[in-house]
Image (spheres, rainbow, N blue to C red):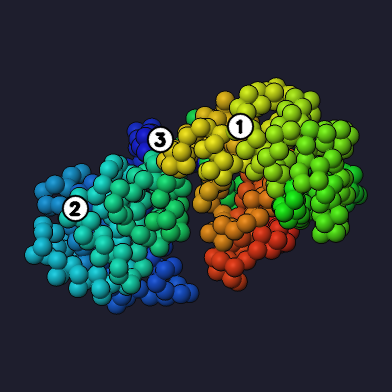
Amino acid sequence: MRVVNTEQMRQIEERAIQQYGIPSMLLMENAAWAVVEEIRRCLVQNEGDLAGLKAVILVGKGNNGGDGLAVARHLVLQGMDVTVLLFAGTEQLKGDAALNLRLFQGTTGKLFVIEGEKQRLVARFALAQADVIVDALYGIGLRGALPSLIEEYVNEVNNASACVVSVDIPSGVEANTGKVYRTAIRAQITVTFGLPKWGLFLGEGPIYCGRVAVDPISIPEAFLEDESISTYVLTDDTIREILPIRHFKGHKGTHGKGILVAGSKGMSGAAVLAGRGALRSGIGLLQIVTPQGIAKDVDASITEATVWPAPGEDSLNEESWEVIARQAEKAQALAIGPGLAQNPGFGLVLEEILRTISCPVVLDADALNLLAGESSLIEARNGRGPLILTPHPGEMARLCQCTVADVESNRLDLALTKAAEWEAVVVLKGSVTIVASPDGRAFFNPSGNPGLGTGGTGDVLTGSILAWLAQGVSPLEAACLGAYLHGKAADDLAEEYGWSGFLASEVADRLPKVRRSLELKLG
């Protein structure tokens, strides 16, 4: 599914109105119905009745407010007790929003124009009694902080016990950046229209938007599939399309050989976890190159892989090239970095790998740190073969010689810029991981949760990407598969344990289950 910025969404809506002839009022009406249906799912079970429940709708003066007024009218007709809090003078509403105000005023719903403190008591009482609160204050056009009067009411909403539903995007969240200046509506559900917006996945957007429901509101699919839009969100359907299907006569040779270069003294677990991620992602043959000083420990911990000791007691050094080159001769993919340590001598080996090995190469962890210490190393790869980099924000900051704050405030643009500059697929990890391609495409990965914030989970992801590459999946699709299924495995664990306490090894062990759950829906 494509993801858009504010200008792209406005252009799509304008085309739907001007070229396809859809009345703007109909788009607003469809948007309202989409919100009503999500409210029904939130409040009642098994097609139950909304009658008698209480709703408060916070309305601004723009089209987002018009959507909210249409929602309010439909909820009144569903038998709900509806109160509208209008944060504008009635004369300020124009066009479709003004029409929806008049239509609502013809119902039994209550409307209060909020002008200052004198309405605070009424609003506070209504919010405290509400079963659902609908945020229709500001839409995708907001820039900067909310007005101070509205901020006070936003805090009241965020402290209420009701289900909070935002219309298109939570008020206070910038649609292009996800930035929140002081405060924003914290929604349980955000119903977004046409296509999801960048700000739902960037910055603080994911913290405030809750579950995102997307409704096309009758905009033609041809407009939503505009090829000029190059940002996407990964979904179950996306991943099903790229999952490799195994042949009945397949064997370990046809399922791919991958080389994992990993581990150092005290960090043998990183090699083991990356190997486990690869094996649980279906690789046929996994061969681990690790320092001879820890090779026995790695071998004992991951019996399904072949372990090749290379020179170095504590960490791999410049003499490890011969072992790596020999094992990589017939490999379909190579991954370097988990628990590697930053031995300067291995930098020479890394340069040789990038310069001479033509199969896809994944760089993670200390391989990225070595790269950051010698930026010209990456030039050795240009044109020699596919490359995937998997930095977390700290590693990306070192690679780009900037601060972590700089990375976090500019994730999408930075990932795309560096993917093009480095001629590599960049997997910028975070609460919403971004997979960026050198051709200008970018994919937001919505799967995963804070439970992944524990040691070793990144190693599992590296191993998983290695496995998909070895099975013949393209670098961009392998990165998307690895990131999405890795997050889905964590989400599956969170159903049992919540957002803390599960282990990186358990994430690896859930990978076959979540893959299978997608495969079963293929038919």
Q: Is residue 22 above or below residue 67?
A: above
Q: Where's residue 23, x and y in %? A: 32, 42
Residue where numbered disc 1 is placed: 373
The residue nearer to you, when weighing 226 against 171, is 171
Name the residue located 87 percent from the left edge and 37 percent from the top edge: 323
Residue where numbered disc 3 is placed: 8
Name the residue located 65 percent from the left edge and 63 percent from the top edge: 503
Q: The C terminus lies in which quarter of the figure?
A: bottom right
Q: Where's residue 313, x and y in %? A: 81, 46
- Residue placed farthest to the bottom in the image? 52
For label 1, count other residues whose C-alpha is less than 10 Å away and answer few (under 14), some (14-19) or many (20+): some
Give the number of the mark in front: 2 or 1: 1
Local secondary structure at mark 2: helix
For label 3, count other residues whose C-alpha is less than 10 Å away and answer few (under 14), some (14-19) or many (20+): some
Q: Is residue 511 above or below residue 146?
A: below
Q: Earlier in the sequence, mark 2 or mark 1?
A: 2
The residue nearer to you, when weighing 199 against 301, is 301
Q: Where's residue 415, x and y in %? A: 53, 35
Mark 3: amino acid: Gln
Specify the label residue 148 is tagged with: 2
For label 2, count other residues whose C-alpha is less than 10 Å away and answer few (under 14), some (14-19) or many (20+): few
Would residue 408 appear left or right of 344 to someone viewing this image?
A: left
Local secondary structure at mark 3: helix
Q: Earlier in the sequence, mark 2 or mark 3?
A: 3
Mark 1: amino acid: Gly
